[in-house]
Amino acid sequence: MIRAAACVTALLAGCALLGGCGAAERERSGAAPLLVFGRTGLGPGEFSYPRAAAAAAGHRLYVVDKAGRLQCFTQEGQPLNAWRMPEIQAGKPTGLGIGPDGSVYVADTHYSRVLIFDPAGLLMGSFGSAGSGPGQFALPTDVAIAADGTIYVSEYGNQRDRVSKFTAERRFVCSFGGPDDEAVRLARPQSLLVDRANTLWVADACNHRICRFDSAGRLLSTFGRLGSEPGELRFPYNVDMLSDGTLVVCEYGNNRVQRFDAAGRCLGVWGRAGREPGQLAYPWALAVGDDDRVMIVDSGNNRVQVIAGLSRRTWERP
């Protein structure tokens, strides 16, 4: 609980960035987005503080918000369908993943489980329960599924910040990154990415870094440290990968997205604090589409902004 409280304190300090910027800084923006969609509300195409996203085949994008509602869009922002979580009284989800068959996996954070839906929103199954044992969760934050169906789930809370691995049949395999891991101790692992080489990337939010693990849970490398300069991170909440193998990282605390090579060198920055297009307010998530468009969940502005991930014009060079 002490570590969780310390993280919350630091997070609140990071949130002050938006209100503390001078007028000149607020007027600056990143490169103009290709597309902006969404507004505040509970209707189709509207959001109530969206905070997780996942791109899927068929040029689709799934977004979940704090109303406990999942919406499916085309990657041009056209609403397709929506459904609500079966329970939301205890809290709402913070993570989404897409299975090889198109199933939508939801980290149902405050119910200590993962729910699995078909693309139309029909509940197909679930796994996990509250606890500290194998296959149990405190507060699951995200879920990622490898091409072979292997499932990874991140969690935090009660000194159990860790990642658990499951087979495609949802059988527990192992956990790593927790308090008993001698190689690394995670602090609110908020987002997961499995790349084409079956490497697992973890946005280790409260340690302000990105961690890279092999499929057995062995730590391979890390990059990032607390700060606001290019290459530094402040509460990285999401990580995804472009087709050229470079990474894009969404920073809740710095109100921006950074692009990195696989070794952790900053290749560019997009976005600043604010309300205008090209500016961000506490972005929780992003997802890379089929054409390397980066769809950024601009949570505090209740919208999604889309940028061209591989365009040199997108990124402000460090």
Image: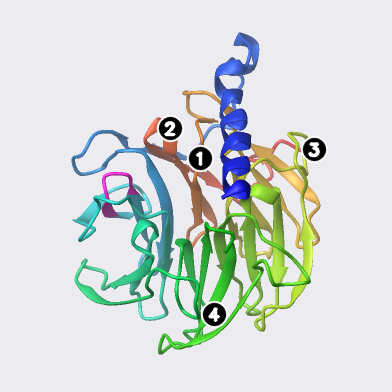
Residue at image mark 3 = 318
Q: Which residues are magenta?
A: 65-71
Look at the numbered disc 1 and give the secondary structure of its residue. Answer: loop
Residue 300 is labelled as 2
> Which is nearer the N-term, disc 1 or disc 4?
4
> Which is nearer the N-term, disc 3 or disc 1?
1
- Which amino acid type is marked by label 1? Pro
Q: Residue at x 20, y 44 (%)?
A: 44
> Percent from the top left, x then y, of residue 235?
62, 43
Q: CA distance from mark 2 to mark 4?
A: 32 Å
Please, which colouring scheme is shown?
A: rainbow
Look at the numbered disc 4 and give the secondary structure of its residue. Answer: strand
**Quick check: 104 above or below 232?**
below
Q: Are marks 1 and 2 in contact (CB under 8 Å)?
A: yes
- In the rendered structure, the answer to whether residue 170 lies left or right of residue 48 reads right
Circle nearer the viewer, 1 or 4 = 4
Q: Are marks 2 and 4 in contact (CB under 8 Å)?
A: no
Q: Are marks 3 and 1 in contact (CB under 8 Å)?
A: no
- Of 81 and 48, the residue lying toward us: 48
Circle nearer the viewer, 3 or 2 = 2
Q: Residue at x 32, y 70 (%)?
A: 115
> Which is nearer the N-term, disc 2 or disc 4?
4
> Which is nearer the N-term, disc 3 or disc 2?
2
Residue at image mark 4 = 165
Residue at image mark 1 = 283
